Image (spheres, rainbow, N blue to C red):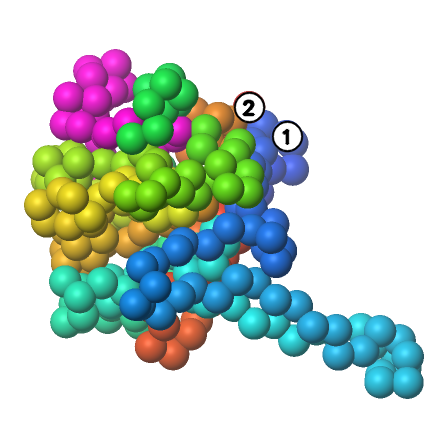
């Protein structure tokens, strides 16, 4: 075992490091994104019992699962969006697995999101964070903390007659993150874009700009209030689905105590 891997193992064994689960539990009641009725819809999670130590299978219990690639806490691959459809190795089964483990920073927008459902992550917000914590390193995950994950049910989607209202980045903020050459962007909301992201130019800039640049997305995260601004390691491997545009996954972060 190399010294670096041994150091990680020792840190976990000694309690010097701990694991934070950034994942919601998959269940039939967890909200999924709602699109205009003329479009296809994201399937909720369903679990059907096949057997439970009974006449259907006397020594085992198991289930059939039905869900969309983008149900619950999930990963977005570049080919999820039209701008990334021609990105090389843009499906979940083609991405270098080294990309699924890497450094992460957290930008705390919870105060703004507490008073404004449509709170925007702007370049000024990012630059203010960098003034305090240093420039965002290249090839780093950037997570937008809003504490939105503490909502549930209809409050989580926050639908109104004009569509959902939830925080997200402006196009200029996404462009600045791309200048930092980030690995991907994650949120606590049902998508990486603001609920009203269709009104930006381009529409849904986190999806359009990030995936067009070959970057990744994570949504429906939780427990970001337990994360430090810098210094954590993110572990986020999606299922290896052939040609997959995304996948539910278990997102974990390793942090020092």
Q: Which residue is mark 2?
A: 257
Front-most of residues 180 and 24: 24
**Which residue is drawn at the image coordinates 43% and 71% (left, top)?**
240
Residues at marks 1 and 2 touching, judged by CB atoms closer than 8 Å: yes
Q: Nearer the viewer, residue 48 or 94?
A: 48
Tell me the number on the disc at residue 231.
none
Q: Which residue is mark 1?
A: 15
Badge 2: how crowded within 10 Å, few (<14), some, or many (20+)? Answer: few
Residue under the image location 25 percent in, 41 percent down = 196
Relative horizontal placement of residue 230, taking residue 253 as reference (left or right) = left
Q: How far across and how far down the image is residue 166, in percent? A: 34, 36
So how many labels did they put on this image?
2
- Please tell me whether residue 128 belongs to the stretch shown in magenta: yes
Where is residue 92 drawn, in percent x and y? 35, 68
Note whether 222 is above or below 67 in the view shown.
above
Picture residue at 42% right of the left edge, 64% below the top: 42
Residue stretch rendered in magenta on the structure: 119-146
First reached walking from the N terminus: tag 1 or tag 2: 1
Q: 46 left or right of 38?
A: right
């Amino acid at each position: 075992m190399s010294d670096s891997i041994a150091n990680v193992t020792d840190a976990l064994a000694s309690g010097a490091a701990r694991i934070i689960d950034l994942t919601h539990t998959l269940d039939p009641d967890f909200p999924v994104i709602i699109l205009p009725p003329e479009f296809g819809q994201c399937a909720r999670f369903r679990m059907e019992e096949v057997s439970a130590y009974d006449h259907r299978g006397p020594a085992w219990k198991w289930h059939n699962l039905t869900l969309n690639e983008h149900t619950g806490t999930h990963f977005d691959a570049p080919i999820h969006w039209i701008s990334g459809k021609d990105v090389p190795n843009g499906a979940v089964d083609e991405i270098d697995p080294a990309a699924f483990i890497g450094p992460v920073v957290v930008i705390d927008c919870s105060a703004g999101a507490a008073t404004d459902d449509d709170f925007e992550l702007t370049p000024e917000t990012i630059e203010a964070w960098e003034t305090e914590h240093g420039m965002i390193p290249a090839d780093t995950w950037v997570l937008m903390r809003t504490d939105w994950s503490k909502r549930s049910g209809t409050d989580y989607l926050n639908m109104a007659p004009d569509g959902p209202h939830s925080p997200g980045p402006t196009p200029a903020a996404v462009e600045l993150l791309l200048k930092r050459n980030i690995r991907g962007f994650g949120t606590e909301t049902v998508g990486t874009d603001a609920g009203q992201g269709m009104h930006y130019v381009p529409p849904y800039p986190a999806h359009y700009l990030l995936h067009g640049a070959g970057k990744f997305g994570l949504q429906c995260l939780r427990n970001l209030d337990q994360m430090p601004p810098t210094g954590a390691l993110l572990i986020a491997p999606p299922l290896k689905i052939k040609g997959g545009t995304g996948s539910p996954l278990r997102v974990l972060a390793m942090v020092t105590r």
